[in-house]
Image (cartoon, rainbow, N blue to C red):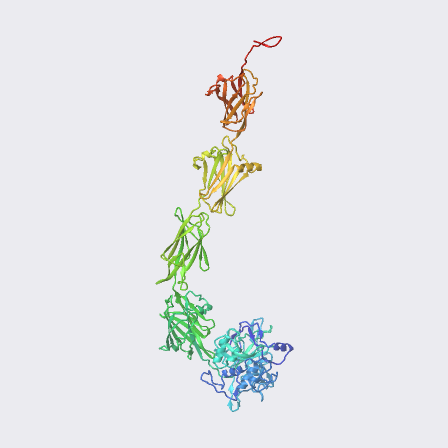
Amino acid sequence: MKKGKIVIVTIAILIAISMVTALVSVLLSNNKEISIAGLTDEIVNASVTLGQTKITINSPITFNKANNQNKEFDVDGKAIIKEAANLLGKNYNMGETAQYGGKGGVYSNVAYEPSQIREIDCSGLVAWSLKRLGYEFDGPLGNKAISANNKIPLDGNHFVTKAIGTNLYYFNEVGTYIKNASQNTYSFNTTYPKNNISASSFYTNEITCNKSNLEGKRINVLKVNDPITNDFRYYNYYDKNGNKKVLPMGTIVYSHGGTPTTDHSWIYIGDLGTSDSKKAADKLISMGIINENQKQWVEGISQSHHWRIESHGGAGVRITNNDPNMGDKDGTKTTGTIWAFQVANDEILEGEYHLNISKRSSKDNLDTIEGLQTYTNCIGGAEFNLKLYRNNGENPNRDINITSNEGKMTRINWDNPEVTSNNSKIKIDDVTIMDKILVEETKAPENYNLPETNKFELRIYKKLNGSRYELNKIEVYKEDGSKIGEATYGYNSFFINKQNNIALDMSNNAITVTILDTAKEGMYNLEIEKIDAKTKTPIPGIEFMVKMYPNTSIKVTTNKQGLATLESKKITIDDYEDIDHYLISENTNKKYATLKGELELYVKKSESEDGFIATGISNTTESFRDSITYNVQDTLGNNIICTARLENNCISLTMENTPYVPPILKLNKVDSEDNEKFLLDTDMTIIRKIINENEEQVGEKQQLFSGKLKDLEANLLENGKTFVYTESEYYGYPEKYVYEIYENEPAYGYLNILKGKMYIEVTIWCTPNINVSKRIVPIQGQNVSNDEISDANNSILFTVNNEDRTITGIIKNPQENIPFELDLYKHELNSDKAVSGINFNVSKDGKNIKEEGFTSQASAICLDKVDKVLKGKTYTYIIEETNTNNNIVNKIAKTEVKVTAREDGTISANISRVMKKGQDTWQDYNNEFSNLVVLEGPDENNKVTVKIANSMYYEVKLIKRDYETQLIMV
């Protein structure tokens, strides 16, 4: 035995052994392999001299020896396996070696028919198979192993049993490997559990015997107490020259897990080239070992390609690829070991392989084995020439042309190339010379380009692996002889070389060559140009939503040049016949009127010499051409013309936008009685702040101006009647402008409606349509009543004109008022004695104050009483005497009086003209009339009194009477 690394192992515990303790009995009743953990990878040093025992065959089996590795035995290993396969599906029962009726614990030398066997254990399967083939063993195998009735070892113990003197030693009493915990090393225990017993003492003496006139054959003991390591599995052994090999087919294998575990046995089949149950079963059927009905008992339970037949606790007789690890058991530091006995000739499994072609696109995901094996992506229509040179012959054994399949791999049938659904096999009968296959792609599939490297040489190396001819490695070369890469045959063995358009997969005993072609492609560009409808200059920062059917959307924004460029739209063989459909909409913009709705754009594509290109555009699915025009409206109702042009495979969509005008604030500061009078002397302050969409103030407040309106000539329009302020920059919506308007001093003679205690707050929302609100806000620290706020509100009005985005505010100011009273006193000339009963008609600024007129009284009468006279206002009164008594003389018929409210808040009055009685012309008032009509006042109450004097006319008449009779005497 040679050096090997020890690893953790799992061993099937199925060997029936003698009852040692109640605990052992419990373990055995589970009918399962027991996991023995704890081995590491330290090297074990031990050597065992292989011994010799002979066997004879009572009834030699005839078979073809041409493929045998050796010819020592009269039976080949396949015969043992085929015989054992007759019990596939039988249940397991420990102790049932081959006993008819399933009675446990009874050894029998009778090989009953398979139908008579109901249950069987692991060693029973071995013994029964050998009995059926006529095997008998002679030699020092122990009294219980070889007797008149038992010519075959019936269990693991007795297959490895030795009589030394009067002592009989069994399999589990042979020294085993144990672990030195302190040193973390392993050594061969030559004294456990029997003193002076070592593995090297077994099978050291040649024993010869004859039976039934047939010469006995030596047992080849290939493994003696060998551990299992990562690189030395149960199916590996070292020959006498130290070469690591694989067990021959039909080798009897016994495993011992170390005290106190049970043992297990099985028959090794070989490397079937796969770990897949179905593929392994198909191989066994093709070898004639099992039939179609028995394939259900082939169970792949690991990734190993090495298979065995065994009777397993809890499962029964199965063919499995179980690849156990051996190891410590419950801290006993005792390792498991393997014995292997060759009792039949090895059979070389005739090897073969086959070739597949997979035609794929260079864009496929080919970075993993799964990607390589996604054959549904295969491309059809590629044409190849293939030449096969078996054993590197001078002339090709086959020279065929094939066409690749669509959606599946192309299986190469060298005898019938048109059939690409089934392979024909390439036999391996010489592992000393490589095979060679030349692969040339002669025609690319439609809409694909022939790859730059389209010729490859596959150099296929083969090897003998145990009893199997199989692939070893493949090297791939270019036509110039340079090597591209190589892959060694094995599970998931592959390489990918995208630079040279080739990949190789050597899984599953097949060579799958993947050739990568580059699909014809093309592209076109789509850009959106945004310009100002008025200035025709680029508009940056405009965002668009571009929907590309069926389910792709992307946002793009114009740059400083007003261009928004989409990523180039690729055209592939999968979609070049399709019509691309776009929906383009403009997201709400703050400074420009947004286009309503969506623009539809259809793009037609076709093939050109260099690939695929865009050949036409349209706003419908028909009438494709080089340019189209859209008629759309914006949110201001403007008709906007948008154009799309296709030139040099680029689609340019030009869209105009009408800019929103910055809001214009107009103020009319007018007389409350005369809206046409603009009060230029009003002293005002206007402050503005900007609020963004998050209701946050942008920057600091800005004082737009402070002073008298008449000093702001640049802002006075409409013949000086309107103050206008235009924002220099439009910030866009949803920002808003907030203006604070203060009236510092009213125009002279006018009242301040804000009274120095309030200001007007005007808010302008810059939505597509301007919205405005105003409110009266008390200045901080001022007490303002609701009535004062209401009075101010009633004098202020703001309106919006969205056509020119103008906000007009009319702020009315009332004049400052002065009360006065006009009285009339009629008296006698040169006396202050009142004259009553005189009728007058009084007019004010041409209108009679009272239609019925006035009549003088014993005291002054009130002609007019005005509570509020506007400063600077003059009233003209005409007082006309309409009737007099016969005895009253009046030289003045009409008197004109003017009353003026001065700017200083006082009243002035004067008699301006008079008209003499009997005349119809006016005369300026002078001293001539001062004794006839005068004006007194105004007094402290602004009372003005007009005093008009009248002369009295007396007629004297003498009447003569009789004194006594009183009669008038004539």
Q: Establish if 504 lies above or below 765.
A: below
Residue nearest the viewer, comparing 266 with 577: 577
Q: Where's residue 403, x and y in %?
A: 39, 72
On-image quarter of the C terminus: top right
Q: Is residue 254 visible?
A: no
Q: Where's residue 673, x and y in %?
A: 50, 33
Q: Where's residue 908, x and y in %?
A: 51, 24
Residue nearest the viewer, comparing 243 with 205: 243
Number of numbered labels in the structure image: 0
- Toward the bottom, the furthest residue is 213
Q: Establish if 320 lies above or below 148.
A: above
- Toward the top, the furthest residue is 963
Residue nearest the viewer, comparing 901 with 9: 901
Q: Is residue 919 visible?
A: yes
Residue nearest the viewer, comparing 334 with 753: 753
Judged left or right of residue 474, residue 214 is right
Q: Where's residue 955, x and y in %?
A: 54, 13
- Toward the left, the furthest residue is 609
